[in-house]
Structures are given as structure tokens and as C-alpha cells.
């Protein structure tokens, strides 16, 4: 039987999985091994594990990721088990931040560093990990461009920011050391972490008096919904968020049927 280390090497060299994906495999499998008390997982054990997750009402994405991990692992080391994937629901995007709420959060920032980070999240729609990986050379403030290198799925892309966001970043650059990463921890000068970003966003939102649960990715959802409310077409939103699949962007349209109604009312033919 092949070893666990050989499986992880298989993911890295044969499947070309990214380190973050392999780390997720390790965390997930370690928990399963610990709870089941074995490295050799049978079909019955795999099905029971998935059934337990369903009874706990965990998300379909989490359950399907676990099923895929177990299927891939067992298929490599001992012949494999086949686990059925759940049909994913199509939830609506809700509880996003309004323009006024984001303005309040920016006003509540305690320094130019916090303001630059939140402005980037809010105006560009960049993901938390992508923000933490940014370097100064990834920004073109003269043209309002943020170049995302090795983003989600290992893809490069470009998002845009307006002059007001560029101004906040420029003020930050004038006060803080930013080499090589754009944002660093203050004490050890290490690359800023997604954990620290979540903690900061939550704290500033509390100061701003926002009652909603606020986290970095919510700014990405909020940008999309605020663009759509203002009349942006779906292609613009897709390109700004760097979605490779248009269906991913369509969820924002489904979440705001009033936008479809308004557009229909504007363009409807005049028969009478």
C-alpha cells in the first residue's frame, strides 16, 4: 500500500496542486484519521462520515470537498471508495454592506494602514489572501490598476481602483515601510496574514457601529452588489472580480431581481 507522504507528493508533482490546497487535504485527512483511528478507510466508513456531516447540517461545499478528498486519497492508496456528492444549493447573496456602511467603516479606521487595506478590499474586490500577497510593484496608482499575481487557482489578473482609493494607498505608502510586501505586521515586519486582516476588519466594523457580521470577503460581495445596484453590466462585474466562469457572477443578479425589473422597465417595447 502506498504511503500518506507518497499521496501528498502525488498531489504536488502529478496533479500540480497548490500548497494551500495540499494543506487543506492534510487538515481534513488528519481529522478523519484521528477520529476513525485508521489510515485505511473503507467504503462503509467513508459513507458514514459523509452521513454524519449531513446530519450536522454542514455546508454542501464542505461535504463535497470532504467526499472528493476521501475519494482521491483512497483511490490512490488502496483501491478507492466512491462517495456521492451533494447537489449544491444556489443561495442568494444577502447582508452585504451598503455604500453608507462602507463609508462609516473607512471613517472609523484608526490609521492610514487600516484605511488602505479596507479601501483596497472595498474598491477592488480583491480576496483576503490576494491582498496579503500584494507587493508595491503590483500597484499602478497612476492608472488605478491592481495586478493580482498567482491569485485563486494560480491565475493572474487585474482589478481596478478609483482615484480616491489610490489616494488612501498613497497616504499609507508615505508613512509605512512596504518592502517587499505592501502590507506587513508592525512588530516583526512579516507579511500580513489573513487572520490579522479578519481581526482588524471586525474590530474597525465594531467601532463603526455596523451590526452585521463583517469579514474581508464581504467587501467583495458588497462591491459586486453595489456595482449592480448602480447599473453595471454583468460582464463588468465578472471582469472586476476576475471570475473565470460567468455563472459565478450570475448569483449577484439572482440576488437582486429588482435590478432585472428596473432594466426590463427601461427597455420594454412600447406596444400601445
Image (cartoon, grey):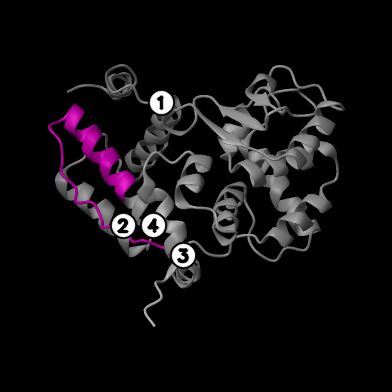
- Residue 210: x and y in percent read 72, 63
Considering the image in quadrants, where does the N terminus appear?
A: top left
Question: CA separation, marks 3 and 4?
Answer: 19 Å
- Residue 212: image quadrant is bottom right
- Tell me the SS state at disc 2: loop
State the image coordinates of residue 155 (x, y, percent, origin top left): 44, 28
Numbered circle sitting on residue 88: 2
Percent coordinates x, y for residue 92 in the rendering: 44, 64
How far apart marks 1 and 2 lie (CA) works out to 24 Å
Query: Cβ–Cβ below 8 Å for labels 3 and 1?
Result: no
In terms of sequence position, does the residue under pointer 3 or pointer 4 come before the other?
4
**Circles 4, 1 touching at the beta carbon (< 8 Å):** no
Residue stretch in magenta: 64-91
Pointer 3 or 2: first along the chain: 2
Vertical placement of residue 240 versus 255, above or below? above
Check disc 3 and report the residue beneath it: 255
What's the residue at 62%, 34% (across, down)? Answer: 131
Q: Residue 222 at what x, y percent from top left?
A: 59, 55
Task: Report which residue position mark 1 lands on.
Answer: 18
For the residue carrying disc 1, how many other residues have a C-alpha within 10 Å: few (<14), some (14-19), or many (20+)? some
Residues 218 and 196: in front is: 218
The residue wearing badge 4 is: 59
- Residue 74 visible in this rendered orientation of the protein: yes
Label 2 close to label 4 by CB (< 8 Å): no
The numbered mark, 1 or 2, whose residue comes first in the sequence reads 1
Say which element carries label 1. loop
Amino acid at each position: 500500500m502506498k504511503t500518506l507522504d507518497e499521496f501528498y507528493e502525488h498531489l504536488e508533482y502529478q496533479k500540480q496542486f497548490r500548497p494551500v490546497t495540499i494543506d487543506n487535504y492534510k487538515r481534513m485527512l488528519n481529522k478523519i484519521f484521528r477520529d476513525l483511528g485508521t489510515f485505511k478507510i473503507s467504503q462503509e466508513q467513508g459513507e458514514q462520515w459523509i452521513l454524519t456531516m449531513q446530519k450536522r447540517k454542514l455546508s454542501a461545499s464542505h461535504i463535497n470537498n470532504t467526499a472528493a478528498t476521501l475519494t482521491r486519497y483512497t483511490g490512490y492508496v488502496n483501491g478507492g471508495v466512491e462517495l456521492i456528492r451533494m447537489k449544491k444549493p444556489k443561495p442568494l447573496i444577502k447582508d452585504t454592506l451598503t455604500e453608507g456602511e462602507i463609508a462609516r467603516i473607512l471613517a472609523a479606521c484608526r490609521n492610514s494602514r487600516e484605511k488602505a487595506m479596507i479601501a483596497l478590499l472595498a474598491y477592488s474586490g480583491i480576496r483576503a489572501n490576494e491582498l496579503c500577497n500584494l507587493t508595491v510593484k503590483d500597484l499602478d496608482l497612476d492608472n488605478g490598476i491592481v495586478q493580482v499575481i498567482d491569485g485563486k487557482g494560480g491565475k493572474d489578473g487585474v482589478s481596478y481602483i478609483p482615484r480616491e482609493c489610490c489616494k488612501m494607498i498613497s497616504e499609507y505608502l508615505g508613512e509605512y515601510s512596504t518592502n517587499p510586501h505592501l502590507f506587513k505586521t508592525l512588530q516583526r515586519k512579516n507579511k500580513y496574514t489573513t487572520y490579522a486582516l479578519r481581526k482588524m476588519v471586525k474590530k474597525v466594523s465594531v467601532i463603526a457601529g455596523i451590526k452585521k457580521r463583517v469579514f474581508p470577503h464581504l467587501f467583495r460581495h458588497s462591491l459586486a452588489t453595489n456595482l449592480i445596484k448602480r447599473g453595471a453590466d454583468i460582464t463588468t462585474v465578472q471582469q472586476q472580480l476576475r471570475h473565470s466562469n460567468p455563472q459565478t457572477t450570475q448569483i449577484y443578479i439572482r440576488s437582486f431581481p429588482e435590478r432585472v425589473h428596473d432594466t426590463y422597465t427601461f427597455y420594454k417595447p412600447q406596444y400601445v
